[in-house]
Amino acid sequence: PAGQLDAARWQRVKEVFAAALERDAASRASYLDEACGGDTDLRAEIDSLIAAHETTEDFIEKPAAQRALGIQDAPERSWIGRRIGGYRIVEEVGRGGMSEVYKAIRDDDEYHKEVAVKVLRQGYDTRSLLKRFKAEVQILARLDHPNIARLLDAGSTEEGLPYLVMDYIQGRPIDEYASVKKLDLTGRLALFRKLCGAVQYVHQHLMVHGDLKCNNVLVTEEGAVKLLDFGIARLLNPTAPGVNVPDAKATSFIALTPEYASPEQVRGGSITTASDVYSLGVMLYRLLTSTLPHRIRGDFSYELAKQILESDAKPPSVAAAEQVAAARRELAAAGGKDETAERIATEFDGFARQLRGDLDNIVLMALEKNPAKRYPSVEAFEADIRRHLEGFPVNARSAGVAYRALKFAGRHRTGLAAVSLLIITLVGGIAATAWQARVANAERLRAEKHFDEVRKLANVFMFDIHGAIANLPGATRARQMLVENSLKYLAALSAESGNQPDLQRELASAYEKVGDIQGRYGEVTVGNTPGAIESYRKALALREELLKANPGDEDIQRELLRNEGKLGDISLQIGDPKQALEHARRAATLAEQIARRNRTEIGDQRNLANAYLSQGWYLAKGGDPERGLIIMQRAIALYEGLVDVDPKDITTRRALAIACGRTGEILVDRARFEEAMRVREKGLAVIRSILEEDPLNANVRRLEAFALRGLGSTLLAQGKPDAALAQHLQAVEILRRLFDAEPDNESLRFDMASFLLDAANSARTLRDFKTAERRYMEAVNALVKSPAALERDLNEVRGQLGIGYLGLASTIALQTAAEPGRSDRRFRCEQARSFEKLAAPILAVADQDPAWKAQIGPHVEQATTALAACGAPRS
């Protein structure tokens, strides 16, 4: 055919044919329809080449391919013993259709190192395949993860064939490793979770792998997971220069391994991160059952494609049971001498029962035919596996009350038994008390005695037991149960309390405690803010009634003062500064009355300073900053006087530092920068004086980070971004050390991410785009790992995540606009637009909330302006 075609035409035939060869029969036709368009001659030529290729025997490897690609019986070239780059080839370790992989050693006396060298096979150096090979180099160069094989070097041989050098991984495919090591179910899931981390890392760098399968994941003898073979990986942006698929007419092409391919890959549709989620689901299916969800039956991959597109996979528990049963039949037929059957029967015995339920649902959700019904990310997939392992409800099934109760019971068998017994005792006691209160006078004394016993039991229940479980991981549901049952108890007890002051006081304390558990500002709670407000108000009403009856009781006044303070904090939290200020004023009035009578009592004087600080803060946040500042400075003066009296009082010194920080924030808002710097430096000095005495105090160390952040924000507002960046980076490092020590502390995770965003903002203002992009990416990576990032409603984590995405969009766009000669300009502009798209769902929710809209609005404007300057096209 070459003689009948001009050079350009023949080159096009070769390109399309080479791409078609790597597709299975089911998707090849749709690809050719698109690639050939209405060119019937081109289609006929390629169809004839494919027919010749598939009917030729293997005595000459793929002669039709050789013919199409211009290889005339090219002899196999031996690389063994030859030098490629700085390495000497030792042996062949693998080969694919277009490339070969060799083991090599460093060819000098500097040090000994074994590597893997991948070389494009001679004769396959067509334009499209060269592009794909070079794309793999570019992709690997951007990835640095402990579970991804590292790229060490790349170049071209003397013959002009491209090669890349990678770590030589001496390991087994992940399914083989699990079998050889006889891993139980938990061990297999732990291994798989490591792989998920690597794939999620790839996705965070805006790439998909596209060919995830067991043979592409090796596990070393030490148990280290290594993800390999990015030869067909591609960026989520399909038009990135230098890393796209063969050419403009073949951009839908991507190779695949049929058994692991997603339905959209089989159809020739768009390849997304959801495709990798599906392939991971297939891998997990194999790890847990020893088989695949869909297997070739017959000689044509069309049959496999039909299964993938039309047939639902069996639940893994069913597949595992069938595999074990079949293995036992084969073993019996072979007289007990079939090693493979014996291995399967032994290795997977008992798995079926363990897989039934959560794991069936998790795997089948990953294998959903509709990408929208799969896990939204690999991270969400891995998180569900973690929830299953920890005994929590999983997202892959509807979580009804009964299901959640069973999961909770499984996690807390001992504690739940004790709590259940206590609840039964409590409810029984209340019922008995209510009944006994109505008996004749002859039974009254006994009823009152029993009533007192129940009251004592209730105190143990709400205070001691809650205190014991409050900081346990996964204790949220237990705390919710305590709240629910406590409220029932308190309602019953209130009805029987009559006019007993002691009991009313106990009830007020109990309602306050329940409110703290429900939603105290600044604490770890069950997240029921409306419930907390209701409980605090019940406590407040009881205390106001008690104070009317006992107007001079200072203990009741102090309790009422504390109550008003908590209601003020939570009112500001829900966006009601007017109500917050009303509570603060009442608190200040009470505090002044108590402090006048007890001028030498440090606790009462500190309560007065606290009340002034809250009142001034609420005023400033509610629209009267000047009056607010006057009252906050009054609080600072009080704190300083108390420190003079007792310089060792850490509680007062800590409160003084917080007051300085808040005052500095309001001064910056008023553009009074010099005053803000002085007061914030004063607060930092106080914090560091505490750290000199107690250097391991994590809470005070965290305050130091916030003080440094405040200084940085002040410097940035003054137009000193270089100095601001230095302060922000110090703050980030403090938070990073604290978070490294407590990686499960979500509050520290959020603080660290927020500080990283501040550092990124400073770097962007300095036009240090490289530092800004790195810090934004660190912040986003931290935030996406928070459970709160998966919620649908807008929260602090999701809000900051949106700001991070917008920061990345604007930073990348600004850098690209500033460097008009960049070769990757189009790719970087598309990358910037991709981050803007990631922020879109968050912005849609923020638009419905005025407070969030005001906070995120400036970041939206910055990103929009930067993207316009970059020239990033809108999708």
Image (cartoon, rainbow, N blue to C red):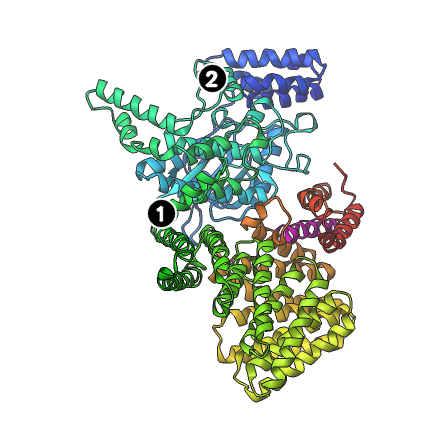
- Residue 272 spot, x, y in % from top left: 60, 34
Q: Residues within 10 Å of mark 1 (few under 14, many from 20)?
A: few
- Callout 2, which amino acid? Ile
**Residue interval drawn in magenta:** 798-818
Question: Camera-side residue: 853 or 414?
Answer: 414
- The majority secondary structure of the magenta stretch comes to helix
Can I make out residue 367 in this image?
Answer: yes
Query: How far from the left and from the top, in percent, is residue 380?
Result: 53, 41
- Tag 1, which secondary structure? loop
Q: Is residue 524 above or below residue 201?
A: below
Q: Is residue 376 above or below residue 37?
A: below
Q: Residue at x 65, y 65 (%)?
A: 568
Classify residue 818 as left or right of residue 430: right
| Residue 55 counted in the magenta span | no
Instruction: Name the amino acid type tagged 1.
Output: Glu
**Does residue 851 sit above or below 120 in this rendering?**
below
Residue drawn at the location 73% of the way across and 41% of the way down: 826
**Residue at horizontal 28%, vertical 27%?**
340
Left or right of 701? Residue 713 is right
Residue lying at the far left in this picture: please name it. 335
Q: On the image, numbered disc 1 is attached to which residue?
A: 222
Look at the image and tell me in which quarter the N terminus lies: top right
Q: Quadrant of the C terminus?
A: top right
> Residue beneath label 2, please?
60
